[in-house]
Image: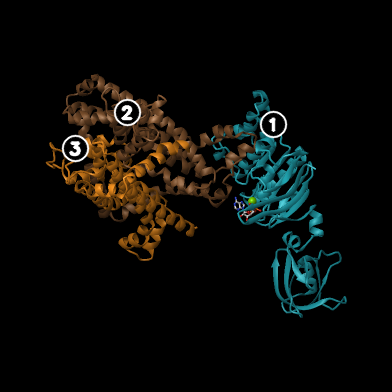
Amino acid sequence: MAKRLSERRRERGTSSSAGRERRSKRAQRAHHSAAVGRRNPALTWGLRFLVVGYLLMLVLWPSWYVVQHTFADGLTGIQTALQDPDVQHALLLTAEVSVLAVAINLVFGVGVSLLLVRYDFPGRRVLSALIDLPLSVSPVVVGLALVLVYNGRYGWFGPWLEDNGIQIIFSWPGMVMATCFVALPLIIREVVPVLEEIGDDQEQAARSLGASGWQTFWRITVPGIRWAIVYGVVLSLARSLGEFGAVKVVAGNVAGETQTATVLVQQKYQNFEQTTAYSVSFLLAFAAVLCLIVVALLRPKASKESR
Amino acid sequence: MIWFSLLVLIPLAAIIVKASGGGWHTYADTLSNSQTLDAIKLTVGTSLLVTALNMVMGTIIAWVLVRDRFPGKALLDLVIDIPFALPTIVAGLVLLSLYGADSPLGLHFANTRSAVFLAIAFVTLPFVVRTVQPVLEEMETDVEDAAASLGASRAVTFRRVVLPTLVPAIFAGASLSFARGISEYGSLVLLSGNLPHRTEVTSVRVMSYLEGGDTAAAASVATVLLVVALLAIVSLDIIARRVARRDGRNG
Amino acid sequence: MSIEVKNVNKRFGDFVALDDVSVSLPTGQLTALLGPSGGGKSTLLRIIAGLDSADSGSISIEGTEATHLPPQKRNIGFVFQHYAAFKHMSVAKNVAFGLEIRKKPKPEIERKVNELLDLVHLSQFANRLPAQLSGGQRQRMALARALAVEPTVLLLDEPFGALDAKVRKELRDWLRRLHDEVHVTTVFVTHDQEEALEVADEIVVINQGRVEQVGTPDQLYDAPANDFVMSFLGDVTTLGGELIRPHDIEVDVTPGEPGAIEGSVSRVLRIGFEVRLTVLTDVGEVVTVELTRTNARRLGIAEGSRVYLNAVLGATRV
Ligand SMILES: Nc1ncnc2c1ncn2[C@@H]1O[C@H](COP(=O)(O)OP(=O)(O)OP(=O)(O)O)[C@@H](O)[C@H]1O
Ligand SMILES: [Mg+2]
C-alpha cells in the first residue's frame, strides 16, 4: 500500500475549518462592503466607471457586434452557414474531438489530482509545476511538438505507429491529443483544491468500515468532488471547442475532413465569406458563454453544499 | 504518467532536441534573422506592456468586484471569463468587428501594433483579476478599519496595508498573463495582419516556419518561447512559495 | 487477549513516534491510551486500525495476525476526532454505509440502522445531513456508524476532543454506559487524565513513543511506575525530595511527629471548598499543600504561619 499523506494533512490539519471560516467571512462581507462603498462616493463611482468602461470597450461591445453581424439579416445568415456541408462537418468534428478530449482529460485529471493530493512520491512538486505548463505554452508550439514526435515521416514515434496502421498527425488522434494538451490543467486545477479542503478523513473512515479502495473512490471521493469535476469539465469543454492554433498545426486543415470549426472560421473569413465566419463564430461563442453561465450558476450551489 | 509523458513531456523534449540538433548555429541563424528577432521583440515587449496594464486594471477590477456592490455586478463577474472561454479565433473576430476596417468608432487598429496590444490585453484579462480576487475576498475589512482608526488616510491604508497583501497575487497573475501573452496566436491571426517586422508575433513566425517546412527553425523559435514561459512559471512558483510562507507566519 | 501489539516501531523521517511498543489489550474491556500531546497515541491507534503501517513489529486482533491486513479487512470500528462524517449522506445513510459495503440485505440494514440510531438517540434525525447536526450528535452518529459493522474492536481517537466541556462529560458517561451494554472491546485515545480515570477499565500511559505503564486506574493512581505517570495523573509537589500529591500532605502548627519538615506559609489561595498553601521550607523547598477549608480554619493558618509538614499514611510517593 502506498504511503498515505497523513503528514501533509496534519500540517494542514485546520484547513477545512479555515475554509469554513473563510466562507462565513464571505457571507459577512455583505454589510462590510456596503460600509466601504459609502466611505467615498466619488472614488467608488470613479472606479466603477473605469471598470465598467474598460470591460465594455474591451469585451462587451465587441462581442455585441459579433451578434449584430451574425443576425444582420435575421436568421438567414446562420441558416445558410449551417447548410454548407463544410460547416456541418467542421462543427461535428469539433464536437467529437472536444468530447473525446474532455473525457480523456477527465479520467487523467481526476487520477493526477488524487495522486498529487493523497500520495507522496519523489517528484511531486515537479509534477505539480509541470501540470500548469500547457497553460503557458503557445498553441502553435504545442502543435509543433506533437508533429515532431508523431509525424508519420520523420517523427520519433510516428513512422513506427504508421507501420502499425495508426496515423496520428493529420488525423483525429492528433487533434484529440492537441486538444487534451491545451485543456489538460483545467480539471486538475479545479479538483486539487477541493480534494485538499475535504481532506482524507472521510476516505479513511470508509476504509475502516470495510470499503475497498475502489468503493471508497466511488462512494466517498467522487461525491465530494463532483462539483469541482463539473466545473472542470465545463471549462475544459469551452477551451476544447475553441482550440485553434494547436489543432490547426496537427490537423492539416482539409475542408470536410480534418477542418475544425475554429480553423474554418479563419478560412471563411479570409475567403471573404464573412457571414459564414460570423455565424460559426457566434455559435462557438454562444457555446463558450453557455459553459460560463452553467459554471456561474453552479458555483454558489457547490460552495453552499460543502459548508 | 505515461500518458502525461507521451502527451506533454516527450513532445516538448522533441522540440528542444530538434532545435539543438543542428548545434548552436541553428539558434544563431534563426535568431539573427531580423524578421524573427523583430517578432520576438514585439511579442515580449507588448506582453510586458499589457502585463503592466493588467496589474493595474486587474487589481482595480478585482477590487470593484469584491468590495463594491451595484446591480449587474454578477454580469461583470461573468464577463471577466469570456476572454478565457472564447475561442481565440473568435476573439480576434470580435475585436475586429469593433476596431477593424469598418469600425463604427473610427478606430482602425487592424494591421497595426495597437491591434497586437489590444488582442493580448483581451485574452489576458482574466488572469490578474482571478488571482487577486480570492485574496481580496479573504482579507478582512477589519484590517483596513483598524488602520483607518489609527489615523491612516485611505490612500495610506491602501498602500501600507492592502497592497502588500495583494502583491504576491498580483505578481502571480502577472506571470500567468505574461506567459499567455507571449504565446498568443489565434486572436492575432485575423487582427494583426501579420506584417513582417511590424505586426508579426512569435507564434505566427513559428507557424510560417512550420508551413515552409523548416521545422528546425520553428523548433528553435519555439524553444525561445518555452524558455521564456518556463521563466514565468518558475517565478510564479517562487512567488507562490513566498505567499505560503507568509501565510504560515500569520498563523 | 483481544489486541496484541508486539515490538512496534514507527518513525517519521528521523523522528521516532513509537519506540518498541508492546501492549496487550484485553477482550471486552474499555482501554484508554493516555498521554501528552505528540506522545504517539494516535499513531499507535492508527497502526492498530491499519490506517498507518508500522516499520517493524506485529499486530494481532482476536488471534488473527493483522500486521499486513488492509484496514477494510480488520473488522474494526474507528471513530475520528473530527467525526469524518460523510457529508453528502444522510445520518441513516452514514450509519448504513458499512452494511451496504458488506452487501447485507435491505431489510436487515434498515432494522440495524434503526436499532443503532435508537441506541445513540438520533432516531429523529435519521434523514438530516451531518451538517445539520451539532458536534455531539455528529460524534454519536460516527459511533453508531462504527458500531454498525459489529466490529471486533472499536477504536476511538480523542472522540470528544472537539466538544465543549459539558457535552464532553455527558458523552463520556454515555460511552461508559454504552460499553456496558454492548461489551465490544474498545480502545480510546485521550490526553485528559480525568476522562481516562473515570471511564476506562484499563489505562495505557504513552509518552514520547514509549509505554510508561499499563494498569487499572487505581493501580496507576496509587502505584505509579515513575515520575512521569505520577505527575501526569494528577497534581504533584515535592516534599523532602520526593514527588507527592498535595492532598497527601498533613499540616500541623505544632512540631508533632519527628521528621516533620518545617517551613512558613508564603501564600494562601482559596479555591471553593479547598485551600491551597504554598509553603517555603527552611531547607528552601517550595511545597504546595491542599487541605479542606475546615481544616485550614481549625489550624488558623494565614500567610506567615509556621507549619510542620508530613506525608499522610499510605501516601503515594515516587
Ligand atoms: N505523518 C506524520 N509525519 C511526521 N510526523 C508525524 C506524523 N504523524 C505523527 N507525527 C509525529 O509523531 C508524534 C506522535 O504523533 P501522534 O499523532 O501519535 O500524537 P498523539 O499522542 O496522538 O498527540 P495528540 O494528543 O496531540 O493527538 C508527533 O510528534 C507527531 O508530530
Ligand atoms: Mg492524536
Chain of the residue that carries numbered disc 2 in the rendered image = A
Type of the residue with mark 3 = Leu
Residue position marked by numbered label 1 in the rendering: C115
Q: Which residue is mark 2?
A: A170
| Residue beneath disc 3 | B96
Residue type (three-letter) at the residue carrying disc 1: Glu
Disc 3 versus disc 1: nearer the observer: 3
Quadrant in which the N terminus of chain A is drawn: top right
Q: Colour of chain B?
A: orange
In this rendering, is residue A186 above or below A166? below
Residues beneath discs 2 and 1 located on the same chain: no
Which amino acid type is marked by label 2? Phe
In the rendered image, residue C53, in percent from the top left (x then y), is placed at 65, 45
Q: Secondary structure at mark 2?
A: loop
Q: Which chain is brown?
A: A
In terms of secondary structure, where does tag 1 sit? helix
For label 1, the crowd category at 10 Å Cα-Cα, with few meaning under 14, some 14 to 19 and many 20 or more, is some
